[in-house]
Image (spheres, grey):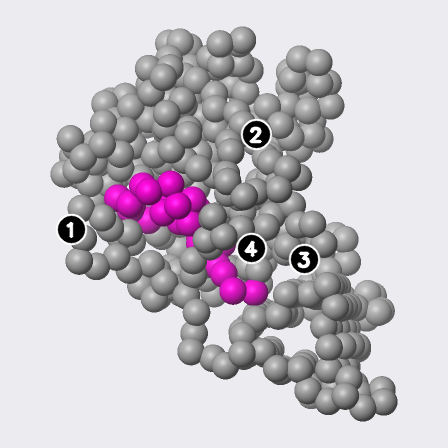
Amino acid sequence: MTGILSMILAGGEGTRLSSLTSLRAKPAVPFGGNYRIIDFVLNNFVNSDLLQIFVLTQFKSHSLMKHLSQAWRITGLTDRFIDPIPAQMRTGRHWYKGTADAIYQNLNLIDTYDPEIVCVFGGDHIYKMDIRQMVDYHKTKLAGLTVAAIPVPVAQASQFGVIEVDESGKMVGFKEKPKEPPKTIPDRPTHVLASMGNYVFDADTLVNYLQLDAEDDNSMHDFGHNIIPMLFPLGNVYVYDFSQNIIRGEPENSKGYWRDVGTIDSYYEANMDLIAVTPSFDLYNKYWPLRSYHPAVPPAKFVHDEQNRVGHAINSAISSGCIISGSVVNQSILGYSVHVHSHSYIEKCVIMSNCDIGAGCRIKKAIFDQEVVVAPNTVIGEDIEFDKKRFQVSESGIVVIPKGVRVGFD
């Protein structure tokens, strides 16, 4: 027995993120200046000292695979690994049919390592979690499956698997993305209990039910739609309360923080969470380091101190290699090697690496993908109707500029 094997589902297309996922899988989307979305779940496992990890990839996986090779190599320790596993069509000539099928097609890995417990987690959420605490809960309950859960507003219930739980923590009801009004949390009528898509399985239970599911031609081969509904009536599925997860050094307001970042607006808002004075997601906790790939670039530089031409940033996160040259950056996140030229004003923006913003620009509430070049005196975010003619604009008015676009040169 090797104990605990971890499998991260990182093959998602992320279609609701539109142009941000036109060239890459959702877990590979840059986030928070220095990171990719996949980094957060990987840091959770590494910081929990769970270091036998397979990352299952599928759609548009090149940039994700490259990032994993640069940032997450473990060498020299034979029993510790973080291995990307591309879809290999081991069970037929088809891609993964669903989340359960993704694990089913890789049962050979479970057979090889013969673990007692298998953790199956999604690769596209922003949160911190000491996974050992969930595993300990699972062991204490002698569960076949433990599902991590959080409260979400009733209005969002149709986006999640909605759980009913008894006083012992046992799951007694489950509906995947219900269309009808679901049962709310007792004494909390505005919220339902939702699955986070993070599972801890007894290995034998997982293997047995994946094989049963694979034999059902009518199945969607999905954990939420098929595996959990098969398991919970047997009385051995428990629910782990994510809000009880304790991480040393975390501020009280961060408890239970978890974001899906599946839409442009949720992605933008989660980035903005990072730069609050007391952020609900803290990048600076020394007891929970957040690793990623860091390119060989110089420190950020702020230049010019002249009247009407001062380079400075306020309430912002500025990555290495940036040059803020006689311009103002306010409430924004800048990735690596962004150059903002003189007399420009950037406000409430998420700008990914290697962008160049010309002199005299005014840009508000925008997301720039990598390698965008903006002509001098360009205005974005002030006239939304005009912006809609040129770019994608989200429901809340966030302007999205795709990777490599040259803006304002026509």
Label 3 packing within 10 angstroms: few (<14), some (14-19), many (20+)? many
The Cα–Cα distance between marks 1 and 2, rounded to whole angstroms, is 35 Å
Looking at the image, is mark 1 or mark 4 earlier in the sequence? 1
Residue kind at label 3, given as amino acid type: Ile
Where residue 111 appears, x then y in whole percent? Answer: 16, 34
Secondary structure of the residue carrying numbered label 1? loop
Q: Position of 382 compared to 404: left or right?
A: right
Q: Which residue is mark 4?
A: 284
For the N terminus, the image quarter is: top left
Among the two numbered marks 4 and 3 on one chain, the one whose residue lies closer to the N terminus: 3
- Give the image quarter of residue 50: top left
Residue placed under numbered mark 1 in the picture: 78
The residue singled out by tag 3 in the image is 275
* Rendered location of residue 296, percent (x, y): 42, 78
Q: Which residues are magenta?
A: 33-55
**The quarter of the displayed image where residue 238 is located:** top left
| Label 2: which secondary element | helix
Residue placed most toward the observer, 96 or 258 = 258
Eye-nearest disc, 2 or 4: 4
State the residue at coordinates (26%, 34%).
Answer: 4
Identify the mark at residue 243; answer none if there is no mark.
Answer: 2
